[in-house]
Amino acid sequence: MVKVKLRDVAEAAGVAVGTVSRVLNRNPTVADPIRRKVQDAIAALGYELDPVAQSMRGGRTRLVACAIRDFDIPRFGIFIKEAEQVLRAHGYTLLLSSTTNRPEVEVELLRAFEGRKVDGVMMTVSDEGDPDVIAALAAARMPVLLIDRDRIESTDRVVVDHRTGAALAVEHLLGLGHRRIAMLVGDTKAYPSRSRVQGYRDAFLAQGATPMPRLLRDRVLTPEDAFRETMALMGLAEPPTAIFVAAMDMLGGCIRALRTLRREVGKDVSLVAGADSELAELHAPPVTAIAWDLAEMGRHAATMLLQRMAGEAADAARCLTLPTRLTVRQSCIAVAPPAAGG
């Protein structure tokens, strides 16, 4: 079979070769009637775009990389699905990789992405203060957007207002009379955990109360960590009356520990999840949880990166913050607060 060439499509559509090229590259300057004529000619002739040749001509690979901490976090799938749909609609293919939450891997991935000549990167970083990561981001030749990280202000960011969400959760528990409120949180070197701890303390301060340091457990990064810390907390002489599982995707480990100890959620202990999920919704009783729109987050991240890659964004780095809300369910009960001075 004779391969259909660009000039064949141009002749069939009665337009210039450059017009066909602009249609293939989704250039918005092409009028809709002309675009349809070219698309009809492409379909009639069976023309197939050569992505390698197109990349060589345009200096682009039409590839975007996304590097996240761990593939085992189901909720990240919502973000990735929405981001991928936006990118695919603009002719990009999304490559997915895991950082394993280690700075040295993040630096290696940035270099690898640059070697593959990807057009842009979306990623998380484990330690926003790591000098090697900061240097690698500054040296990157392609645009990089950080997912839920706020301290590296030279880079575009999309973040969630975890501080307000955590404050809402703890305020809810304080309002029910709880004072021994435990918190399971991830690594405070990263924005989500750091801001959740701030929100936890904000809520106590607003009530004129003081959190108990021994009830705050950080670096809870796996369900096994959540299980172990919950077991330890409930083994204290004065165990918490409420647990705020602020680490993402750690609710299952906490619930498993409570079941092992035969402690009933909503009866023996109150429970709030830091990220809403099917488990939180379907657990008996359903678990009160903080929620935010991960689909919206994925769409915004992809759109901001597309704008940066196209040179349509302002020179200054941008930061978009998405709101959180508290979904109150049946996992929390009222208790008598301790007497003054107790």
Image: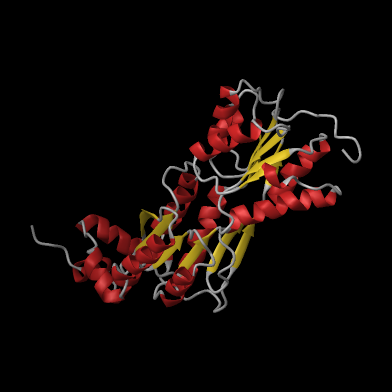
In the figure, is residue 116 to the left or right of 202?
Answer: left
Q: Which residue occupies 74% across, 43% down?
A: 170
Q: Which residue occupies 31% across, 66% down?
A: 112
Identity of the residue furthest to the bottom in this view = 315
Above or below: residue 326 compared with residue 163? above
**Residue 65 vs residue 59, the one in the foreground:** 65
- Is residue 11 in view from this perspective? no
Q: Which residue occupies 22% across, 59% down?
A: 48
Which quadrant is the C terminus positioned in? top right
Occupied quadrant, residue 90: bottom left
Q: Which residue occupies 85% across, 47% down?
A: 207
**Residue 198 vs residue 215, the one in the foreground:** 215
Q: Residue 101 appears at what percent x and percent y?
A: 45, 54
Above or below: residue 4 compared with residue 311? above
Which quadrant is the N terminus positioned in? bottom left
Occupied quadrant, residue 161: bottom right
**Residue 266 vs residue 303, the one in the foreground:** 266
In the figure, is residue 263 to the left or right of 219?
Answer: right
Identity of the residue furthest to the right in this view = 340
The number of numbered badges drawn on the structure is 0
Q: Residue 179 appears at what percent x and percent y?
A: 79, 39
Identity of the residue furthest to the top in this view = 262
Q: Residue 80 appears at what percent x and percent y?
A: 45, 50
Identity of the residue furthest to the front in this view = 237
- Is residue 60 in view from this perspective? yes
In this figure, which colouring scheme has been used for the structure? secondary structure
Q: Residue 287 appears at what percent x and percent y?
A: 65, 31
In the figure, is residue 8 to the left or right of 136?
Answer: left
